[in-house]
Amino acid sequence: MTQEDNEKKLHESLRQKTWDETVTKDSWMVFKIMSEFVDGYEKMAKIGPCVSIFGSARLKPESYYYKMASEIAKKITEIGFGVITGGGPGIMEAANRGANGNGKSIGLNIDLPFEQHFNPYIDKGYNMNFDYFFVRKVMFVKYSQGFIVMPGGWGTLDELSEALTLIQTNKIGRFPIVLVGSEFWGGLLDWFTNTLLKEGLIAEHDLSLFRVVDNADEAVAHIKAFYDKYSVSVNF
């Protein structure tokens, strides 16, 4: 056997070892994922009816939408719902702040290399931490009776898209989704209509899966009107 053959054999052996180790690691990862689901389900099942409020972690307390998020959260608790956020700063902090002391204030945090840290307005025992975005999103969808979506970036769009997709495909029952800020969301809504709908990529009734509002009273009124008509339940 030549030296070249020996080197090829060694390379193949090392590649196979790396592959085997990856498979083993992936298999054990399942248990970590399961533990996040179990911990999340056990805590979230006790909270009662809630509305999730999403939005940017980057908005400061002096911003218009920070103040509105806090107002919306307070008004949400006044009609009998708790508030769930992503647990971090910005809009999440504002919403937990508005709910704190008025109703349940829950934070579902995610480990990130920047931006994310628990805000101080989450109820004791309800500041949960997740490694996996997909587990965290399941908690939002399963235990929320409505989504209020403030201005935000990729994460906010991800959470909005997840809910719209699950409702559109009948994987979960319909619940109210409110987009706050017609000026902020206007460009995206135009794209929905002038591109997605025009190209036949969505149906016209898909545009009725959400409501666009411009103030706290409108946002809360839409949630209330929905549950004046339908009963509150866990989504799946």
Image (cartoon, rainbow, N blue to C red):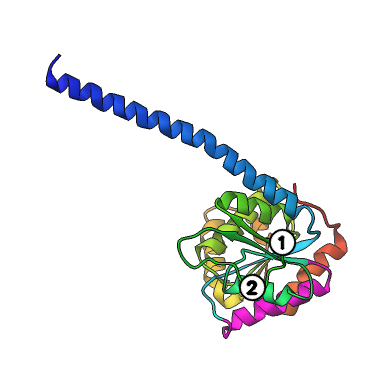
Using the rendered image of the protein, determine whether residue 34 is visible from the camera's viewpoint. Answer: yes
Q: Which residues are magenta?
A: 61-81
Residue 117: x and y in percent read 55, 67
Q: Which residue is mark 2?
A: 120
Looking at the image, residue 222 sits to the left or right of residue 3; the answer is right
Residue closest to the eye, 50 or 129: 129
Q: Earlier in the sequence, mark 1 or mark 2?
A: 2
Residue 97, compared with residue 15, is above or below; it is below
The extreme bottom residue here reads: 62
Residue closest to the eye, 210 or 96: 96
Residue 19, compared with residue 127, is above or below; it is above
Q: Which residue is mark 1?
A: 125
Residue 18: x and y in percent read 36, 32
Does the CB distance between marks 1 and 2 fall below 8 Å?
Answer: no
Residue 198: x and y in percent read 54, 58
Residue 78 painted magenta: yes
The extreme left residue here reads: 2
Residue drawn at point x = 68 percent, y = 78 percent:
70
Quarter of the figure with residue 11: top left
Residue 2 painted magenta: no
Looking at the image, residue 145 sits to the left or right of residue 85; the answer is right
